[in-house]
Every structure is written in structure tokens, then in C-alpha cells.
Amino acid sequence: MPSPGPIVVVCTANICRSPMAEGLLAHALSGQADLLKNLKVISAGVAARPGEAVSENSVVALKKVGIDISRHRARPLTQEMLDQAVAVLVMTQGHRAMIELQAEPVPKQLHLFREFMPPAALKEIGDPFGGPLKLYEQSRDEMVEAIPSLLDYLRTLPLGA
């Protein structure tokens, strides 16, 4: 049986939120005892400039939790990525809307990164671009908070044996 496609994490420019989410989710998956540990995570942006370096504050925010994303380079989201993805996770409703307007077909597993949080939780992760390190750390912490509910969701997907 072929291995499942990657999880694709999407933000705007692929230099702040989605690289952080990619690093955090890949780290969380690597510690799982089930099929989840074999899933690959990639990130992309709906308006990314290919090859742009990850923002320094994103690097610092993740270094503080022991994850190095300094070598990440931005890449635009492609239809091929969407077609191969086992799940597509976006930061905002705006990102979801852009994908729904432009993708053909629209991925079946298209969700907000925080969609599986309890109903009272904020579902979107705001863009820290250009803000102070504290804003990047807040985005990071919002992602970390969502990971247990994301892992539960990913376990419901047909990932093969």
C-alpha cells in the first residue's frame, strides 16, 4: 500500500506561521507510536515568493522550544500539493476561501489548524509578520495548543496499514 501524502500547512507568504506549524507538527508526529509518526509535513503559502527566507522571529520562537526551522525557504501552494495531501491545514478562513476559489478539485480534508479545538476556542491564528517576538511566540503557543486535537483528528483519517 502506498504511503499517505503529506500534511500541507498553509499561510500567506510561508515565512512565519506555516513554517512554525510545519516544525511543531512534524516534531509532534515524530513522537507518536502509531501510523502518524510516518506522516510528512510540508508548508506553503497562498502568496509566497519562492525561496524567501523564514522570518527571524519565527526561527527564534521555535528555537526557544528546541526546533530549528532556520533552513526553511518559502514555496507557493500548488494544485499538486493539494492533490497529494492527506490533509490541508490553514491559518485563517481567508486562506481556506482562497483555496476553495482556486483549487480544482478542492481538497476534501481542508481545515483550520485550530478547527478541532473546543467550541469556545479561537479558530484562527493571526499573522505576526512584522510584529515583535512576543507576537510570534503567541502564534507558536496557539499552534502548540491545537496539536493534541489535530493528532486526534489525524487518527480518524484512512492512512493505510
Image: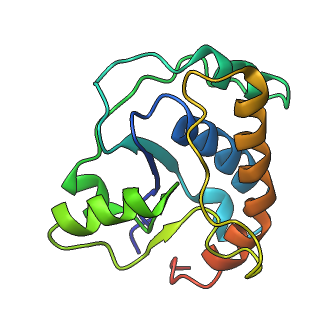
- Residue beneath the point at 20% across and 56% down: 79
Is 155 on the left-hand or right-hand side of 120? Answer: left
Q: Quadrant of the N terminus?
A: bottom left
Asked whether, in this view, residue 31 is left or right of residue 24, the answer is right
In this rendering, the answer to whether 119 lies above or below 43 is: below
> Quick check: 24 left or right of 5?
right
- Residue 16 occupies quadrant: top right
Question: In this orientation, which residue lies closer to the viewer: 44 or 39?
Answer: 44
Residue 101: x, y in percent?
Answer: 20, 66
Q: Specify the quadrant that holds the C terminus.
A: bottom right
Q: Residue at x 74, y 62 (%)?
A: 146
Vertical arrangement, residue 84 with respect to residue 77, above or below: below
Q: Residue at x 50, y 24 (%)?
A: 72
Vertical comparison of 142 with 76: above or below = below
Seen at 43% across and 68% down, the residue is: 86
Q: Residue 119's x, y, as percent?
A: 73, 82
Of 101 and 52, the residue lying toward us: 101
Viewer-nearest residue: 111 or 158: 111
